[in-house]
Image: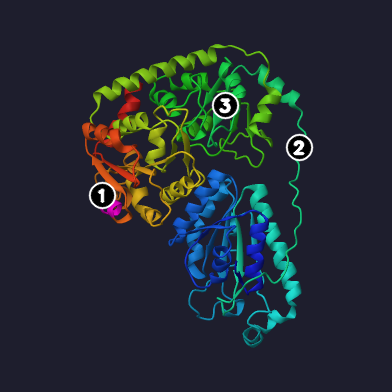
Amino acid sequence: MMYSDIPSAQTLVLYFKSRGVKHIVISPGSRNAPLTIGFTKNPFFKCYSIVDERCAAFFALGMAQQIQEPVAVVCTSGSALLNYYPAVAEAFYSDIPLIVVSADRPSYRIDIGDGQTIRQENVLERHIGYSANLKQDVSHATETVAKWGKTLLTETQEEIQEYNERQLVNALQIARWKSTPVHINIPFEEPLYGVLDAPMFQITEKKLDVPGNSNQEDWSDYASIWKTSGRKMILVGVNQPNALQNEILQSLAQDGNTLVFTETTSNLHHPEFFPSIDSIIAPIEKSENREELFKALQPELLITFGGLIVSKKIKAFLRNYQPKEHWHIDPKKAYDTFFCLSKHVKVNPNDFFKAILPSETQKSAYKTKWQEVKKQYEARREAYLDEIPFSDFTVFDKVMQHIPKGYQVHLANSSTVRYTQLFPMDASLKVFCNRGTSGIDGSTSTAVGASIHAEEPTLLITGDLSFFYDSNGLWNAHIQPDFRIILINNSGGGIFRILPGKEDTNEFSTFFETQHSYTAEHLAQMYGFEYCSAENKEELIQGLDGFYTTSLRPKILEIRTPRLVNNKILLGYFDFIS
């Protein structure tokens, strides 16, 4: 093993090892050389080289999402750090422990005209759980420090070491305990490449005791309101697979006056649940007696848990037809999404439902009515599929049917995640999507990173803008042969044709829809993917038939759909089921 001869670099590496942070994603650079040497020369760490910092951060986020442990990204000084920000924001809103480590220039070299220098301290502070700004060592490059950074000499190296250790402990502790991103900024003076065969000192091995939950709720009040509420709705956002215990799933499914609305990203499945929320609400929006129907759907008690909700329609409905009570169940945080939050219950949903659910279930006309509506839209959806031409809508139907059981499925944002909400998803599939910020910018990189630790093969379903935007996500040596990408290419941002706007102008096609004629064929060749394409139903079925078979290389299936009719067919679906 080798260690950097810069004390702060060595200290950081030793603390990462002692706290079990072993997955390190490194982007190349010179200023971060002391860290790169320390991590790559120690067999405890598993290091990954990703050139593009934005992709690197999403790659690390995907890994942390899977293993539910902190993963670090390490970059050089300057604008490299700023490229981490999209993934940092996603990690912040999705509760993912991403550790950002940025090498920095000495303070006396900032804002004097030197290259690759920006004001790095606290630059991410609005979207992280902790900023650790380490102090520059004065025992390294002492002549340079004495010449240009005399103010740094007011502290001894021992004082600086104590401060830096305390900052590192705080950052690593908060990342793990609070499942949140943290930022560690660390200035280095040249020379940067000096090494030692053994560490210069021993770090403090403090025990980090996880704080207990001091929250003492009176469950009888919750149980009483649950029992006396005749119309209850449970709305579930983003969840890890198997987050809710099976006995609770069964109990909620059997309750006759409870509607459980799930989304594809919730990873919750039961025949009694309602997985296509928009298929329930869109027909009501178009109905002549919409007021009566919305009031019939309006719950007395709303319980939410999980991450952010995809459906805009359920948000609009619950904001206009608010429940008497809204409880959000989460140990960490609660958003007042519907402007009627009455209680944030800071426990795990499993513990909450165990505490309040009665042994006997109730029945009412509330659930029965909407079960009938569900049966009707499911039947109408099948009839609609028989009538429409090849389009995004038919593609998603076929794609969802052909995904092998047990796959890990990553969804890009925008149209992709919204289309999947309309079709059944097999309960064996594990579904992920970057819904913290809902951006299109890192879907591919996240899926690639997540695939590293997945026991099952990984499938990414993506639209064309998301795919081409993050094409550098394929620029790494870590993509496995069982990685699959289904690219639905409708030659632009198809979602903007669904939203209100002028679709027949040059401005619309250029600045909103961003019309293009690109395909993924040459990218696939450059990055070593097998490639096939489809432009009609027959070619799609043929392409899917061999798509998941074992191969020596990853695969891309690109499906071209008609740009000008997709929106009409999607909007026509809601008319048809109405």
Q: Is residue 425 visible?
A: yes
Near-viewer residue (297 or 43): 43
Of callouts 2 and 1, the N-terminal one: 2
Task: Give the residue type at disc 1.
Answer: Thr
Asked if the magenta segment contains residue 518, the reply would be: yes
The residue sitting at 52% across, 49% down in the picture is 63
Instruction: Give the answer, above or below, for where 327 lies relative to 523.
Output: above
Q: Between marks 2 and 1, how big is the CA–CA gap?
A: 54 Å
Tell me if mark 2 has few (under 14), some (14-19) or many (20+) residues whose alpha carbon lies within 10 angstroms of its own.
Answer: few
Instruction: Give the answer, above or below, for where 236 lies relative to 100.
Output: above
Q: Which mark is residue 234?
A: 3
State the image coordinates of residue 358 (x, y, percent, origin top left). 68, 17
Of callouts 3 and 2, the N-terminal one: 2
State the image coordinates of residue 448 (x, y, percent, origin top left). 44, 49
| Residues rendered magenta in the picture | 517-525
State the image coordinates of residue 400 (x, y, percent, origin top left). 37, 31
Q: Between marks 3 and 2, how big is the CA–CA gap?
A: 23 Å
The residue sitting at 22% across, 38% down in the picture is 535
Q: How is the image coloured?
A: rainbow
The residue sitting at 48% across, 52% down in the picture is 58
Near-viewer residue (469 or 556): 556
